[in-house]
């Protein structure tokens, strides 16, 4: 009887010691794991850029027509654009100062599912900001099989922490780090292009490949291996303005009638590098930046100008009485195949014209304080005479008082 009690006592002591030891080890490890792995949601802004995109929060229930910006974009939200609408998602890391970690531009006829958007809850976590996005072919959105969905993704670090975007389509999965990317999705294939950065891509058939800047790959509904293909060549340098303006660009000022000249400076808006065009004054003035290229493009079949612009304010309505004083204008100087020097313009403004102002066919009204993405279309086909040599690209602001931002300037050429 005594032996049984002693054995029971020893068993209790040993079990208690084991439990105490387990607690002493597992509790700190559990706390450490929680501090390292706990996540919180990113702040997400969805803005219509053309037409009326639609969103379905959490992928079920009522579909909402988006007529203005909204911050109510939870995870698992489906965003759809039709053939006249486009939208922009901006994802911000939580914190006292807004810092964007990704910009996702949805072009026309596109459906995207924002699966997750999160950031480590605690500063000691080594994990990156994370965005998981699925892009679906237009057939899933509008019943058409001969059109393509198109999304452009820019990824940036924030708060001393990397950002990783995970992209899914019916044909591939890709891990995207700091840089700029574009995906085009059809029912039969997906095409991923790396403008700048690095992408690890895997097809559903198991083939894997790493893409660098100016490369692309196409994944089909098959087990065919992925190949690294030449992508569009960017003829411009420092179009993201992540380096000083002097890297690639020359600043100029002219036509100052009164007061101070305008300025062009590098800036950062919520972590996004940009060039800022600014002036407070009376009377006309022009300030801008120019990049001289002198590039022969006769061997290319496609030439597209791409940029993002934000007009923050202007004192003149429209682009002035003569339609020449926009808060932002981009000008392409080129020599055509007949040896004639020509110019192509496109301008942006955010205050309505006042009659009888002259309205140029190349002007576009954009919302104040909103990033707007512009793609020119194929200039090889659209210009009045096909270009032979691109001489320069100029971006300038013209008027009295103005403030505007420009970034992601690219002149993309493809053979």
Image (tube, grey):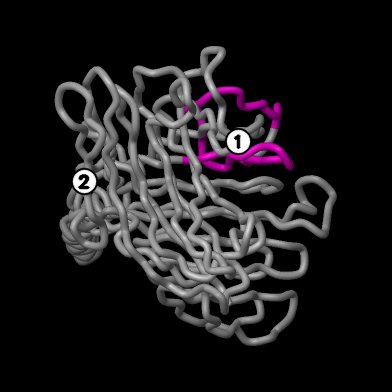
Question: What's the residue at 77%, 56% (across, down)?
Answer: 147
Question: What's the residue at 22%, 65% (across, down)?
Answer: 7
Q: Is residue 63 left or right of residue 19?
A: right
Q: Is residue 142 left or right of residue 25?
A: right
In the image shown, does 15 or 104 lie closer to the viewer?
A: 104
Question: What's the residue at 21%, 46% (across, down)?
Answer: 266
The circle drawn on residue 216 is: none
Q: Position of residue 405 (x, y in %)?
A: 33, 38
In the image shown, does 184 or 36 lie closer to the viewer?
A: 184
Q: Position of residue 146 (x, y in %)?
A: 82, 59
Residue topped by disc 2: 266
Quadrant in the picture for the C terminus: bottom right
Residues in magenta? Answer: 61-89
- The answer to whether residue 149 is visible is yes
How busy is the neighbourhood of tag 1: few (under 14 within 10 Å), some, or many (20 plus)?
Answer: few
Q: Position of residue 246 (x, y in %)?
A: 18, 58
Residue topped by disc 1: 361
Total tally of numbered discs in the picture = 2
Name the quadrant containing residue 128.
bottom left
In the image shown, does 160 or 15 lie closer to the viewer?
A: 160
- Disc 1 element: loop
Decide: marks 2, 1 in contact (CB < 8 A)? no
Q: Position of residue 176 (x, y in %)?
A: 43, 64
Q: Is 39 located above or below residue 384 in the figure?
A: above
Considering every residue shown, the one lying at the far top of the view is: 355
Q: Please check the rendered image and state whether residue 86 is part of the magenta-colored stretch, yes or no.
A: yes
Q: What secondary structure prevails in the magenta region?
A: loop
Q: Is 276 located above or below residue 72 in the figure?
A: below
């Amino acid at each position: 009887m005594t032996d049984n009690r002693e054995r029971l006592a020893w068993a209790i002591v040993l079990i208690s010691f084991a439990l105490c030891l387990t607690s002493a080890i597992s509790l700190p490890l559990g706390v450490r794991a929680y501090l390292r792995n706990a996540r919180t949601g990113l702040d997400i802004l969805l803005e219509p850029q053309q037409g009326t995109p639609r969103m379905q929060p959490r992928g079920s229930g009522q579909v909402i027509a988006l007529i203005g910006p909204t911050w109510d974009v939870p995870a698992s939200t489906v965003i759809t654009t039709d053939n006249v609408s486009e939208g922009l998602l901006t994802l911000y890391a939580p914190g006292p100062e807004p810092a964007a970690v990704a910009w996702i531009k949805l072009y026309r006829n596109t459906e995207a599912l924002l699966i997750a958007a999160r950031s480590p809850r605690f500063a000691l976590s080594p994990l990156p900001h994370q965005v998981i996005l699925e892009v679906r072919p237009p057939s899933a959105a509008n019943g058409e099989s001969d059109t393509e969905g198109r999304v452009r993704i820019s990824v940036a670090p924030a708060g001393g922490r990397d950002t990783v975007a995970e992209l899914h389509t019916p044909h591939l999965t890709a891990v995207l780090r700091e840089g700029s990317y574009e995906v085009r999705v059809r029912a039969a294939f997906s095409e991923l292009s790396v403008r700048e950065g690095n992408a690890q891509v895997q097809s559903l058939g198991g083939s894997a490949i790493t893409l660098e800047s100016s490369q692309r790959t196409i994944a089909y509904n098959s087990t065919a291996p992925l190949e690294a293909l030449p992508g569009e060549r960017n003829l411009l340098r420092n179009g993201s303005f992540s380096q000083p303006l002097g890297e690639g660009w020359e600043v100029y000022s002219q036509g100052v009638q009164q007061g101070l000249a305008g300025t062009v400076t590098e800036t950062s808006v919520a972590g996004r590098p940009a060039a800022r065009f600014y002036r407070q004054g009376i009377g006309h003035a022009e300030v801008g930046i120019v990049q001289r290229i002198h590039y022969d493009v006769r061997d290319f079949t496609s030439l597209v100008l791409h940029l993002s612009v934000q007009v923050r304010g202007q004192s003149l309505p429209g682009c002035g009485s003569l339609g020449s004083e926009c808060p932002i204008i981009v000008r392409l100087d080129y020599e055509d195949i007949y040896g004639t020097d020509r110019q192509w313009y496109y301008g942006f403004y955010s205050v309505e014209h006042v009659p009888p102002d002259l309205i140029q066919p190349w002007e576009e009204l954009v919302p104040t304080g909103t990033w707007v993405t512009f793609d020119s279309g194929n200039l090889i086909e659209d210009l009045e005479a096909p270009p032979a040599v691109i001489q320069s690209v100029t971006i300038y602001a013209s008027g009295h008082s103005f403030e505007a931002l420009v970034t992601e300037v690219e002149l993309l050429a493809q053979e």
